[in-house]
Image (cartoon, helix red, strand yellow):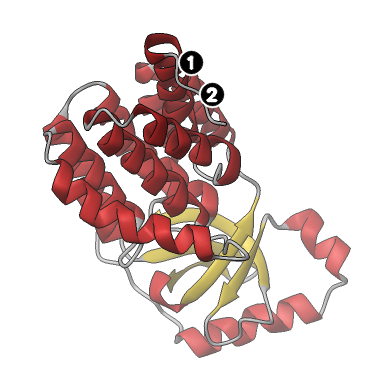
Amino acid sequence: MKLSFPLPLQQLLFIFFAALLAAPLPSALAQQDAYVFTKAAPQQPVVMKVLGVKGSALMVRGQYGEQGIPLAQIQEVRMAEPPESAAAIEAFKAKDWGKALAQAKAVADRFKGLPAAWAVTATAMIGNIYLEQGDIAKAKAAFDDFARAYPGNGEADLGRARIAVANKEYDAARKTAAPICEKALKDAVVKPQDGPIYSQAFLVMGQVKEAANDFQGALEDYLRTVSLFYYDPAAVSIAQAKADALRKQHAVFVP
């Protein structure tokens, strides 16, 4: 189905801004479910009903009906996290891969490409679930799909680095993760978009070091994901399990 945009974006935004300014903010929030920040007006969010993502557009409904806004024009969307998102995380922690996959896909199928942290997390989680199940081909396809939905987001590269670890291509994984870990340790403040990438980078480096029998170094990196860079729930869950296994099997600890 071809998307159509009957109103130019600037006119559409003018209409939404006019509607927003015509009503008190608490009333608008009671009727709508999202703040949409556009790149053209990043300090002036539009309050509207978000329906989901279709193709390359965010579908919204306002007082003038349903419209599509190109994702390329959107800076950020703030809205309530759907219950499937939290359910996917809890199922992942419980290693209930079937439920985790179903819940993560439910979010991604509707919101993939949405610039919201929970949508990014759910979309990236699909590849991690396939990796945990040992399905490398599907994991690769999922991370490629993530890269198309979120171009320029480093989580796709870290997903591919985890695939490299699964394939015992440790040098390739190290080349991706090591510079990110170095940057993470230098950052005085972690930016929201960097947090999940740092989580995954230290997980990858822990796996690389564990494969080289550097168990203490691996434990340190796993615990950095768990305790310092705990922004990606899937990475934290995996790193915690690996840290526990290292302590038990090799009696290592962090001084």
Left or right: residue 185 compared with residue 15: left
Residue 110, label in figure = none
Q: Which amino acid lies under the numbered mark 2 shown in the image of this protein?
A: Glu
x and y, in percent, of residue 158 in the image: 30, 49
Looking at the image, which residue sits at the far front? Answer: 255
Residue drawn at point x = 31 percent, y = 32 percent: 214
- Check if mark 2's residue and mark 1's residue have beta carbons within 8 Å: yes
Residue 239 sits in which quadrant? top left
Tell me if mark 1 has few (under 14), some (14-19) or many (20+) residues whose alpha carbon lies within 10 angstroms of its own.
few
Whether residue 8 is visible, yes or no, is yes
Left or right: residue 159 compared with residue 119: left
Residue drawn at point x = 41 percent, y = 30 percent: 216
Residue ID for mark 2: 90
Residue drawn at point x = 71 percent, y = 58 percent: 32
Residue drawn at point x = 38 percent, y = 59 percent: 180
Q: Residue 184 versus residue 30: which sits nearer the camera?
A: 184
In whole angstroms, how far apart are the C-alphas of marks 2 and 1?
A: 6 Å
Residue 104 sits in which quadrant? top left
Q: Which amino acid lies under the numbered mark 1 shown in the image of this protein?
A: Ala
Q: Quadrant of the C terminus?
A: top right
Q: Residue 254 versus residue 47: which sits nearer the camera?
A: 254
* Callout 2: SS: helix
Residue 31 sits in which quadrant? bottom right
Left or right: residue 228 compared with residue 239: right
Left or right: residue 74 compared with residue 3: right
Whether residue 108 is visible, yes or no, is no
Residue 94, label in figure = 1
Tell me if mark 2 has few (under 14), some (14-19) or many (20+) residues whose alpha carbon lies within 10 angstroms of its own.
some
From this view, report whether residue 177 is shown above or below residue 255. below
Q: Quadrant of the N terminus?
A: bottom left
x and y, in percent, of residue 208 in the image: 26, 38
* Callout 1: SS: loop
